[in-house]
Image (tube, rainbow, N blue to C red):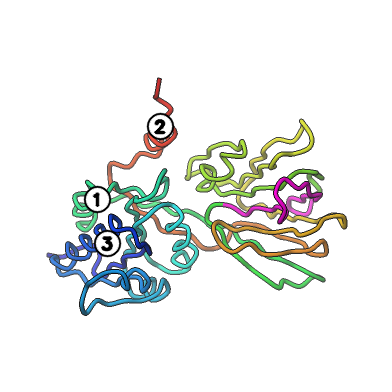
Amino acid sequence: MNYAFRTIGIIGCSQHRSNLITHKTLYNWLKKRGISVIIEKETASFLSIKKVQIGNLTDIAKKADLAIIIGGDGNMLRAANVLAHFDIKVIGINRGNLGFLTDLDPPSALKELAHILKGNFLSEKRFLLKAEIYKHNACNKRVFAMNEVFLHSEKMSHMIKFKVYINNNFTFAQNSDGLIIATPTGSTAYALSAGGPILSPTVDAIILVPVLPHTLSARPIIINSNDTIKLQFSQLNENLKIHCDNQIPISINNKNEIYIKRSNYYLNLIHPNSYNYFKKLNLKLGWSKK
């Protein structure tokens, strides 16, 4: 049978037995259908499968047509920062908690995947942010984030002082514990916990959410995704960090300037035809509970 995807990558490192059963079941199910399968190297080391094709995220992105992420949103974010640089579609099986990005529930995953393999699915593109760290007018580091870029101090509950410019126009100066700059995808993550709005993934915007601001007038701001955000810092700050999704935090100093804008990279997410974003919000956030 001709399927929409000829080569599929299985991603999601886990040592939990229940999760590994999902990996192994999926692998055997795909192989029975004559589909070529690549398993992420770290995951394959925990599976008792002989003669399996293995690779890292880049190998999978180059060779596969579809990547299936098994785990929670953390696994999806980890993979997204690599997969978004390639022409590969992505879907997730939720073995985590909320699972805003991992659509498929394990009990019904194979049934849903059977339809998806026949080409019956919804597609959408989720853009990533690009953060560039400048010093003396030169960019010395560039990182990407699917959810958010988070400015904060290394010390917990420690106030920092910074200025925000949008398209080189001074916007505000702030004393706060930090600032979250989020995509619509990230609006249901840390930005939501900090009091930010929820944006539909189709909204072409970026959110700025202050973290514990030391003024009652500070409010979240929504800007166009084509805008560029610049951060400058007071000389009084110490131990500043930039945190992009679940990546290792980057140390910055008061002489750095940070430029954040929409990148040219998108994650090509797919969903079952039954997917409804607002139904997912209702379920995950418990909006209908009495």
* Residue to which mark 1 is pinned: 109
Q: Nearer the viewer, residue 75 or 45?
A: 45
Instruction: Tell whether position 156 is magenta.
Output: yes
Q: Amino acid at mark 3?
A: His
Residue 74 placed where, x, y %?
46, 55
Q: Quadrant of the N terminus?
A: bottom left
The reply to whether callout 1 and callout 2 are in contact (CB within 8 Å) is no
Q: Determine the secondary structure under disc 3.
A: helix
Q: Determine the secondary structure under disc 1.
A: helix
| Quarter assignment of residue 251 | bottom right
| Mark nearer the viewer, 3 or 1 | 3
* Residue at the spot 23% in from the left edge and 63% down from the top edge: 24
Residue 95 placed where, x, y %?
34, 51
Disc number at residue 282?
Answer: 2
* Residue to which mark 3 is pinned: 23
Disc 3 packing (10 Å; few <14; some 14–19; many ≥20): many
The CA span between labels 1 and 2 is: 21 Å
The CA span between labels 2 and 3 is: 28 Å
Q: Amino acid at mark 1?
A: Ala
Q: Nearer the viewer, residue 122 or 193?
A: 193
| Boundaries of the magenta span | 148-169
| Quarter assignment of residue 274 | top left
Residue 232 placed where, x, y %?
80, 56
